[in-house]
Image (tube, helix red, strand yellow):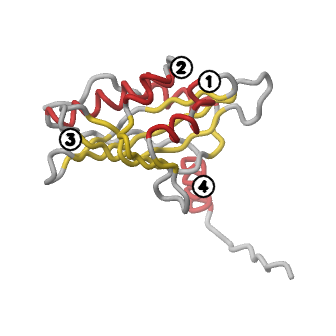
């Protein structure tokens, strides 16, 4: 049985407002101003950028060096990938970057009461590299939990993200323009 859909009579201004809201929902939100981050949060920010660079540079060794030995990726899924070796193996195709390019950057890093644990988040852009691929771009977001080891190095302990949705060329450009290299420090 098909659901019955009834059209509501809307005023012209309300109709235009709803159209504007629907159009806005299809674009990337503009980044909110970021409160100044602490030195430790900026260290995680830099480490996140370094982690993303390991993928951009197709450097499997650098990628693995960013992972905690007992990391869990896809940590919100029923069967996360566990351990540095398994994660590196599962991500090998993304690291090679022959059919799909993944880019991401932080927009927020937070450290709470445990000074050796940090949370980071930001957008992630996937680009299919095959000629004529549709959709060419997809956009999502990631969330990572970092742990600072006894050696003082921050490594990803947990990682997960939103399932990417198709994105337009304009959204891909907005993603690129939203990237900040410099940590927002006070």
Q: Position of residue 174 (x, y in %)?
A: 50, 30
Work out how far the residue at label 2 is from the one at label 3, CA to CA, in angstroms: 32 Å
First reached walking from the N terminus: tag 4 or tag 1? 4
Query: Which one is earlier in the sequence, the residue at label 2 or at label 3?
Result: 3
C-alpha gap between disc 2 and disc 1:
7 Å
Q: Which is more foreground, mark 2 or mark 4?
A: 2
| Residue at image mark 3 | 35
Circle 3 sits in a helix, a strand or a loop, which is it?
loop
Residue 16 badge: 4
Percent coordinates x, y for residue 120 in the rendering: 33, 43
Q: Quadrant of the C terminus?
A: top left
Q: Nearer the viewer, mark 4 or mark 1?
A: 1
Residue sitting at x 35%, y 32%:
48
Front-most of residues 81 and 144: 81
Report the mark closest to the observer, 3 or 4. Answer: 3
Label 2 residue SS: loop
Residue at the right extreme of this rendering: 1
Task: Give the Cα distance between marks 2 and 4.
Answer: 46 Å
- Of tags 3 and 1, which is closer to the observer? 1
Residue contact between numbered discs 2 and 1, judged by CB atoms under 8 Å = yes
Report the residue marked by disc 2.
Answer: 58
Q: CA distance from mark 3 to mark 4?
A: 34 Å
Q: Which residue is mark 1?
A: 97
Q: Residue at x 23, y 47 (%)?
A: 117
Q: Quadrant of the N terminus?
A: bottom right
Please state the horizontal and vertical placement of residue 12, each as a whole percent of the image. Answer: 62, 60
* 91 shown above or below 131: below
Vertical relation: 35 (above or below) 181: below
Indicate the position of residue 95 as horizontal and vertical percent values. Answer: 56, 26
Question: Considering only order in the chain, which callout, 1 or 3, is on the residue closer to the N terminus?
Answer: 3
């Amino acid at each position: 049985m098909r659901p019955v859909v009834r059209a509501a009579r809307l005023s012209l201004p309300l109709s235009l407002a709803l159209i504007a809201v629907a159009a806005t929902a299809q674009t990337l939100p503009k980044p909110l101003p970021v409160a100044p981050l602490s030195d430790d949060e900026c260290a995680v920010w830099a480490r996140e950028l370094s982690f993303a660079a390991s993928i951009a540079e197709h450097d499997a060794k650098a990628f693995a060096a960013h992972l905690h030995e007992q990391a869990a990726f896809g940590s919100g899924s029923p069967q996360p990938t566990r351990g540095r070796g398994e994660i590196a193996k599962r991500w090998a195709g993304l690291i090679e970057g022959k059919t799909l390019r993944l880019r991401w950057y932080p927009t927020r890093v937070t450290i709470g009461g445990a000074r050796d644990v940090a949370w980071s988040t930001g957008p992630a852009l996937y680009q299919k590299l095959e000629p004529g691929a549709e959709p060419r771009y997809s956009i999502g977001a990631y969330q990572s939990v970092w742990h600072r080891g006894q050696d003082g190095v921050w490594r990803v302990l947990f990682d997960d993200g939103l399932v990417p949705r198709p994105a337009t060329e304009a959204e891909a450009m907005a993603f690129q323009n939203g990237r900040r290299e410099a940590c927002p420090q006070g």
